[in-house]
Amino acid sequence: MSQHITMIGAGLVGSLMSIYLGQRGYKVDVYDKLPDIRQASIPAGRSINLALANRGIRALQQVGVMDKVNQLLIPMKGRMLHDVTGKLTLQPYGQKPEEVIYSVSRAGLVSLLRDEAEATNNVTFHFETKLVDIDPENQTINLKNEQNDDVMTHQYDILLGTDGAGSKTRRSLESLGLTGFSSDLLEHSYKELTIPAGDVNQFQIDKEALHIWPRGGYMLIALPNLDGSFTVTLFMPNKGPISFEAFSDKKAVERFFKEQFSDVLELIPNLADDYFTNPTGILGTVRAKNWAHGNILLFGDASHAIVPFHGQGMNCGFEDCSELYRLLNKHSDDWSKVISEFTSARRDNADAIADMALENYVEMRDSVRDPQFQLKKAIAFKLEQHYPTQFIPRYSMVMFHHIPYADAYRRGKVQADILTQLSSGNDNIDDIDWQLAAQLVQDKLEPISKEFLH
């Protein structure tokens, strides 16, 4: 391929996209401001594991690395709810054996992807090299070496910005006068803790579940790691009586955990110390009307960062890579056509998953405890059994199929109305009017194309 690809950002999305391009025959240079995670440990408190689902898996399969990725995965069959007394309730994600999501190490996955990119012999990573600015007219960028402060100018043919939610590529375009970008912070933040492994790498709680301690306005979650530990994340308001602002000393933190998460307090040694040592992370949503300018294209979190409550940030970014690959095939590597079409192909879907992720925060921290929520979930599973191409629960559409996010969001609203109508006045699934259910499904939901079903 005659055109040289320059990428800013060597995270998960940038590393995967470099594999696609390297395998395609492009020469690719990837610049990242951070040290190489293969040689430097990840900072404490920064999302060390993620949820991998079908959209991400398909992209990994396309570049032929899924067999290796499988060795990094721990299946999670559902949400394990912990109430205040310590009572456990498992809510399965789906009703088929294969309908699980996977906990995966961020460091392990990004290291594997970088190794595979370099194995194409077409991809070169440049770490601790920071983007300074962009000159689109001359198709040049200035880059700064973080170790010696040297600045160099680099000519690009195609510039891809995959440098995350705080994207310097995006901010550089904004400084040049491009508009249509927004960044909205949630009034909640997060803090990570760790449940260590027990004796001989034993998991101290069920390893095949995503654990949730839903408490209404806030929650705790835990995902398993291969070494037997769990990454624990506290999501909480920034201000208020129960908030990050409210807990200013170790005794207050210990008292809070003893009252609300007593079963966790027993599992985390030095919890209060870790609470104040680890950083508090912000949560926000980035949206963009247009992801492209000339030969510059943004994707992944750089153009559509979302809150983590649907486990789709990485999966959506990986789907971006798969879509870019599709468009390169469609347009025979005519980048002008690919870049022109990419935004329209992805923006509505990115906006839809951003909205669903925000809604899922309320579901995870609160709705999952509601008997009516649980009844609706049971009805939805029953309808899926009878009408598998018409009624698929929204969570399943997002996590286990390839239905465009925008379609899943639209259908999900229709299905929510159906479930509300069927459950109204009922407390038990045996009381449901199934004739009415059949009529509603047939009248309101068109069949889903088989190409989108897993």
Image: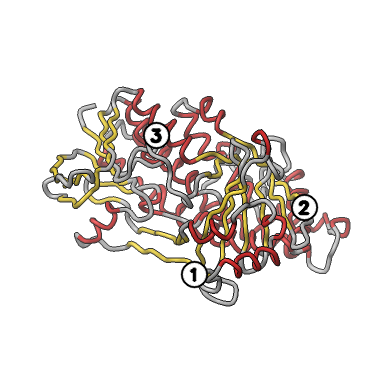
Residue drawn at x 61%, y 44% is 196
Give the quarter of the image for residue 385: top right
Secondary structure type for disc 1: strand
Could you say which disc has been placed on residue 187 in the image? 1
Sooner in the amino-acid sequence: mark 1 or mark 3: 3
Q: Decide: marks 1, 3 in contact (CB < 8 A)?
A: no
Q: Is residue 161 left or right of residue 300?
A: left
Crowding around mark 3 (Cα neighbors within 10 Å: few <14, some 14 to 19, many 20+) is some
136 over 180 or under it: above or below: above
Residue on which disc 3 sits: 38
* Residue 127 image offset from top left, x and y in percent: 29, 39
Residue kind at label 2, given as amino acid type: Thr
Mark 3 or 2, which is nearer the eye?
3
Residue kind at label 1, given as amino acid type: Glu
Residue kind at label 3, given as amino acid type: Arg
423 over 99 or under it: above or below: below
Residue drawn at x 66%, y 68% is 255
Secondary structure type for disc 3: loop
Residue drawn at x 45%, y 53% is 350
Q: From the image, which quarter does the N terminus lie in?
A: top left
Secondary structure type for disc 2: strand
CA distance for labels 2 and 1? 29 Å
Residue on which disc 2 sits: 89
Sooner in the amino-acid sequence: mark 2 or mark 1: 2
Is residue 218 or residue 419 the one in the foreground?
A: 218
Sooner in the amino-acid sequence: mark 3 or mark 2: 3
Is residue 159 or residue 309 the one in the foreground?
A: 309
Crowding around mark 2 (Cα neighbors within 10 Å: few <14, some 14 to 19, many 20+) is some
CA distance for labels 3 and 2? 38 Å
Judged from this view, the residue extending furthest toward the right is: 430
Is residue 179 or residue 308 the one in the foreground?
A: 308
